[in-house]
Structures are given as C-alpha cells and as structure tokens.
Image (cartoon, helix red, strand yellow):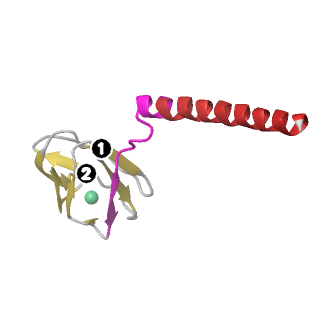
Amino acid sequence: MPSDANDVTTADARRRLFCGALCVVVMGALATGALAAPVVHTVTIEGFEFRPPVIAVKAGDVVEWRNKDILPHTATAQPAGFDSGTIATGASFRFTAKTKGRVDYICTLHPTMKGTLTVE
Ligand SMILES: [Cu+2]
C-alpha cells in the first residue's frame, strides 16, 4: 500500500535525523572532553586524620579533601605542590594531580596530621 510505504520512508528519515543529531552531540562531547571526566578520589578529614592517609592516583585525576571535623584543617603539600588554605567544617578542597611523583602533605593548623599523595 502506498500509505504504508510513505510511513516507512518517514520513519526511516526520522531515524536518520535522530542518528545524525546524536552523532553531533557525541562528537561535541568528545571534543570538549565531557565523556573523559577525571576520576575524583576523596580523602575524608575526620578525627584529626586524613583518611586514607596514603592515596595513589593517576595524572589528571582529582583529589578532593572533605572536612568532616568540627574544626578547620588544611591539606598543604610540603615543601610545595598544593595548598588548600583553611578548609572549614563541611567544606572541601579539590586539587587536580598533574605532576607525577610523591607529595607529602600536612595540616598546617595541626602539623601532626600527615598524608601522602602519589601521582602515577
Ligand atoms: Cu588540622
């Protein structure tokens, strides 16, 4: 029947249009890096400790320190690398690990708090 043939053609055209639009969206996402989102590693600050105290990530990954203590803390690389500044209770600090190697860090407000970040 002619009407059936027309319906098939219309459905085909719609399908092609949808696939084309989807392709544009996917390519756009790839171009902007939206599909290659970095891995986020969380270090919880609690009980005057970095948990976990030792963490290994890949270059390009993000490390997020979340302060769950009732006092402010910092995550400060020694001698250099990153410095969160004061992280208030309930707040967090994010650092994108770009340089490979090992970085030891402390809380400058409570220097007995120590952690190690290894970027592979
Ligand atoms: Cu502290």
Q: Are marks 1 and 2 in contact (CB under 8 Å)?
A: yes
Query: Residue placed farthest to the front in the image?
Result: 1
**Which picture quadrant has residue 111?**
bottom left
Residue 85 in sight here = no
Locate ligand 1 by image quadrant.
bottom left
Q: Secondary structure at mark 2?
A: loop
Q: Which residues are magenta?
A: 28-46
Expressed as whole percent of the image width and height from the top left, the position of residue 69 reads 38, 64
Choose between 5 and 114: the one closer to the eye: 5
Residue at the location (49% across, 29% down)?
28
Residue at the location (37% across, 59% down)?
67
Task: From the image, tell me which residue sits under label 2.
Answer: 75
Residue at the location (83% across, 33% down)?
6
Q: Is residue 94 magenta?
A: no
Q: Residues within 10 Å of mark 1 (few under 14, many from 20)?
A: some
- Compared across the picture, whether 84 is left or right of 89 comes to left
Q: Is residue 10 above or below residue 112?
A: above
Expressed as whole percent of the image width and height from the top left, the position of residue 35 reads 43, 41
Residue at the location (30% across, 44% down)?
95
Q: Quadrant of the N terminus?
A: top right
The disc labelled 2 sits on which kind of residue?
Ala
Of badges 1 and 2, nearer the viewer stands: 1
The disc labelled 1 sits on which kind of residue?
Phe
Give the CA distance from mark 1 to mark 2: 10 Å
Task: From the image, tell me which residue sits under label 1.
Answer: 95
Going from N to C along the chain, the mark reached first, 1 or 2, is 2
Residue 102 in sight here = yes
